[in-house]
């Protein structure tokens, strides 16, 4: 227990360092300017102000995510501190459960402490770690816990305990109501547990009990969701927007076989995520080793990976942050490299220097962590934004103008939520408060009507002016424009329009 506590504290320290440097939600940054995070924040503030997701404000992620951001907005409407703390906690748990899983096969070895900083830096400097605060980033620890709980039960030759099955149900329920494309992992995990139980005579009679415990966890998360939307008469909106529209309006059209589309998305994810990909692929050496009982770990990993791949890329879209969720499988690479540390050419040095000399261990860890911090500062793609203060950003520049109007309304037109609602405190002017990646004319009709009827005090556009959208300009005038970087490689020009009074 003490060793687990030490591992958790070490994981938390690493998380504070790497998330503090690498995520735009960190206090070291003026704000997180990622459009997805601001969609979540706008929805959360809407809930606090009495609006119902999907019915009154349209966005595509799951309701639990909005409830979390509603809590953040309730406690602090103009700060990312709570978002940062959530990132630190979930990332620390990812590192912690990765360490615990590795120790199932390695014992209580110090090698894990030398590899967790490498894992922590590898993920935060990867191509798919964009901006910070993605659902995929928060979900990493849930997936690693799922694999850890099952492999631990196998190692101890028993069924899943109530706590393990129930916790996996809780995590599956959270992902169901946050971003259900990650559920392919749990489909694979459930299929493996079914095979495992049915092939072990001692476990067959416990199969229904384990299924019930898992479903109980899913229900504990799902019932409050149904109650909330039922009370507000918006269950139809929930299913239409979150399920139907995401399934039928969000994906891309393609002529090639779907399996080919999924495969191409996966290949792209592999090519661009070599930072942590080497840990995943080296982990195959562990999964394929010859061991009478080892087929279970290999089969579990294969089914979970395949299920996650299919549901993540089913729509034919492979945005960079989608592939971050696959970093959960880095844990098997940890086992391989820790084994090499202990049992290869460095065996003698390891025994001589690291086993009994605590000062050498601590000094070496400090040097390694420092090296990984330096690596993060060089290769994390968000670091550029540290050089800016709030006043330097386009969000706060426009906010000064927007806040000259009492209780201002705003429309973020033509692009995803750019953080202007957050910085200015303005109220969305219509249900479609920003452009979303859905193929529906209703969105454009409602936003265009809002502009043509002069229903909002301010409009923000990116890329194009209102004239370039061929919209009626009789109600609005351009009051400011500003060019600002959005990520390491791109800068955009933003335009602010104010209603003529």
Image: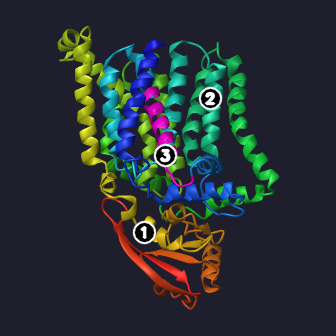
Decide which of 82, 307 is in the foreground and name it: 82
Callout 1 secondary element: helix
User: What residue sits 72% from the left and 31% below the top?
Assistant: 216
Q: Is residue 10 magenta?
A: no
Disc 1 designates what residue?
397
Work out whether mark 1 precedes mark 3 in sequence or the reverse, and give the earlier one. 3
What whole-number distance in Å separates the C-alpha atoms at marks 1 and 3? 21 Å
Disc 2 designates what residue?
167
Crowd around label 2: few <14 · some 14–19 · many ≥20 (10 Å): many
262 w.r.t. 153: above or below: below
User: What residue sits 37% from the left and 53% below the top?
Assistant: 268
Tell me the mark number nearer the camera, choosing from 2 and 3.
3
Disc 3 designates what residue?
81
The x and y percentages for residue 211 are 69, 28
The C terminus: image quadrant: bottom right
The quarter of the picture where residue 183 lies is top right
Range drawn in magenta: 77-97
Callout 3 secondary element: helix
Work out whether mark 1 precedes mark 2 in sequence or the reverse, and give the earlier one. 2
The x and y percentages for residue 223 are 75, 41
Q: Are marks 1 and 3 in contact (CB under 8 Å)?
A: no
Callout 2 secondary element: helix
Magenta segment main secondary structure = helix
């Amino acid at each position: 227990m003490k060793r687990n506590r030490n591992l958790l504290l070490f994981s938390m320290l690493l998380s504070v360092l790497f998330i503090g440097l690498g995520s735009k939600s960190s206090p070291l940054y003026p704000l997180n300017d990622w459009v997805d995070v601001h969609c979540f924040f706008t929805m959360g503030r809407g809930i606090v102000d009495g609006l119902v997701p999907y019915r009154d404000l349209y966005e595509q992620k799951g309701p639990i995510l909005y409830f979390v951001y509603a809590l953040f907005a309730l406690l602090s409407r103009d700060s990312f501190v709570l978002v940062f703390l959530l990132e630190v906690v979930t990332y620390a748990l990812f590192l912690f459960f990765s360490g615990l899983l590795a120790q199932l096969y390695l014992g209580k070895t110090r090698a894990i402490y030398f590899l967790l900083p490498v894992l922590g830096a590898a993920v935060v400097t990867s191509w798919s770690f964009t901006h910070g605060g993605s659902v995929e980033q928060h979900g990493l620890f849930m997936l690693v816990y799922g694999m850890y709980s099952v492999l631990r039960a196998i190692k101890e030759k028993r069924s899943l305990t109530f706590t393990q099955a129930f916790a996996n149900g809780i995590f599956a329920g959270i992902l169901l109501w946050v971003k259900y494309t990650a559920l392919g992992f749990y489909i694979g995990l459930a299929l493996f547990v079914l095979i495992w139980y049915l092939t072990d005579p001692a476990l067959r009679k416990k199969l229904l009990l384990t299924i019930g415990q898992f479903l109980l966890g899913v229900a504990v998360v799902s019932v409050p969701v149904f109650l909330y939307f039922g009370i507000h008469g918006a269950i139809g909106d929930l299913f239409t927007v979150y399920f139907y529209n995401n399934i039928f309006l969000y994906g891309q059209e393609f002529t090639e076989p779907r399996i080919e589309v999924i495969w191409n998305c996966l290949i792209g994810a592999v090519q661009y995520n070599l930072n942590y990909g080497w840990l995943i692929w080296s982990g195959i050496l562990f999964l394929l080793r010859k061991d009478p009982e080892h087929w279970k770990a290999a089969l579990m990993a294969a089914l979970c990976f395949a299920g996650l791949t299919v549901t993540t890329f089913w729509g034919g879209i492979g945005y960079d942050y989608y592939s971050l969720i696959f970093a959960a499988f880095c844990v098997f690479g940890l086992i391989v490299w820790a084994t090499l540390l202990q049992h290869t050419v460095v065996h003698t040095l390891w025994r001589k220097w690291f086993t009994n000399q605590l000062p050498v261990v601590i000094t070496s860890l400090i040097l390694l962590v420092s090296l990984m911090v330096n690596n993060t500062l060089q290769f994390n793609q968000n670091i550029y934004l540290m050089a800016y203060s709030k006043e330097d950003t386009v969000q706060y520049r426009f906010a000064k103008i927007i806040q000259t109007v009492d209780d201002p309304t705003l429309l973020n037109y033509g692009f995803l939520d750019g953080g202007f609602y957050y910085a200015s405190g303005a109220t969305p002017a219509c249900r479609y408060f920003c452009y979303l990646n859905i193929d529906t004319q209703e969105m454009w009709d409602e936003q265009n009507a809002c502009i043509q009827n002069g229903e909002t005090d301010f409009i923000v556009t990116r890329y194009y002016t209102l004239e370039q959208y061929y919209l009626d300009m009789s109600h609005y005038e351009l009051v400011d424009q500003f060019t600002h970087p959005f990520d390491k490689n791109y800068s955009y020009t933003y335009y602010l329009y104010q209603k003529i009074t």
